[in-house]
Structure formats: C-alpha cells, structure tokens
Image: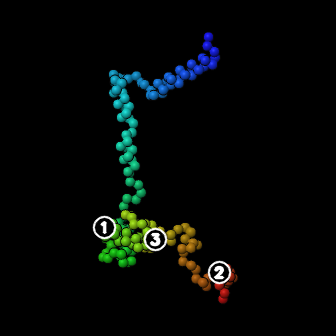
Amino acid sequence: MFSFRATLAVVLNATLIASPAFASHIHRAPTGGHSHAAHKTSAKSTRPSVKSSKSKSHQMHGQQGIDPERVTQIQQALIREHYMDGEANGNWDAKTLGAMQKFQADQGWQTKLMPDSRALKKLGLGPDYSNAINAKDSSFATPPAIATIPTDQAAGFAVASGIAH
C-alpha cells in the first residue's frame, strides 16, 4: 500500500500534467450543423481585429477647425502687428498659417498648425472676462479713481508699498 505522501504526490502530479489540457480553451459542441473549423472561424470574427483598434487610435480629437469669425479676428491682429498684409477674409489659408507660424517663431514658441494660446493672448485675443460675475471686484476690472479711495486706506497702501510721500 502506498503511504499518504506517495498518494498525495501521485495525485498532484496527475493534476499538474492534466491541467494544461483543460486550460487551453473551452470546447463547445457545434450547433446547427457547423463543423469545428467553422465554429472557430465564427468565434474569431466576433473578436475585434487589430485593424479596428488601430483605426480607433487615429480618431481626431479636439478642435478640428477655426470659426471664420475667429479667423478674421486673428488675421486682423496679424495685420495690425505687421505679420500679414491685405485684408482679413476669414479663411484659414496658407498665408494666414504662415503669418501665425512666423509670429509664434518670433516669440520663441513652437510653431503649430493651430494657433498657440500664448500667441492669441499676445495678439490681444485672449479670453474676455469683463462680463464675469465677479469682474467688478477683480484685478482685470478698471481700477477706481484715486479720489474715491478713503484717505486712511490710501495711506495704508502707501505704507505697505514702502513709498515715502
């Protein structure tokens, strides 16, 4: 008779030898008269192919074009800064693209197909916060006239700034 350890060793070895055969794939019996080869082919066709996953990675994201009204604003700013001549036409054409790339290069920025946000701000075309809820009390609002600031507050500003009168 085998000892307990010998029996356990035989059972473990048999399990290890047989497990790859069970783990390789799940075999389903063909239905509806399909052969095993046809079943494999149909199972493959339901999986996403490599081609479809590559096409997903090439989908365009973000802004694809510039609104003609915005192009006109950009062109007017480039004309004002002497990077373009002529009149703004609202078309993002080769002339406009070249002018924008030259402007960005002159600033030491990377030239891109689309305008860089720094370039738009530098051209005076950055975001307009004048209608924001808190615009009245913000740093980008027009400062109040000096006569409207109480004298003790103005004196406090002078002391804090270190400016002697």
The answer, for residue 62, to whether it is visible in the render is yes
Please, is residue 62 above or below residue 33 in the view? below
Indicate which disc, 3 or 1, sits on the residue closer to the N terminus: 1
- Per the image, the residue denoted by label 2 is 161
Task: Residue 121: give its label.
Answer: 3
Helix, strand or loop under label 1: helix
**Distance (Cα) linking label 3 and label 1:** 22 Å
**Distance (Cα) linking label 2 and label 1:** 50 Å
- Per the image, the residue denoted by label 1 is 94
Amino acid marked by disc 1: Ala
Which quadrant: the C terminus?
Answer: bottom right
Indicate which disc, 2 or 1, sits on the residue closer to the N terminus: 1
Q: In front of the other: label 3 or label 1?
A: 1
The answer, for residue 153, to whether it is visible in the render is no
Helix, strand or loop under label 3: helix
Helix, strand or loop under label 2: helix
Amino acid marked by disc 2: Ser
- Would you identify the image quadrant in which residue 117 lies? bottom left
Task: Residue 60: give its label.
Answer: none
The image shows residue 121 at horizontal and vertical percentages of 46, 71
The image shows residue 99 at horizontal and vertical percentages of 35, 71
**Distance (Cα) linking label 2 and label 3:** 30 Å
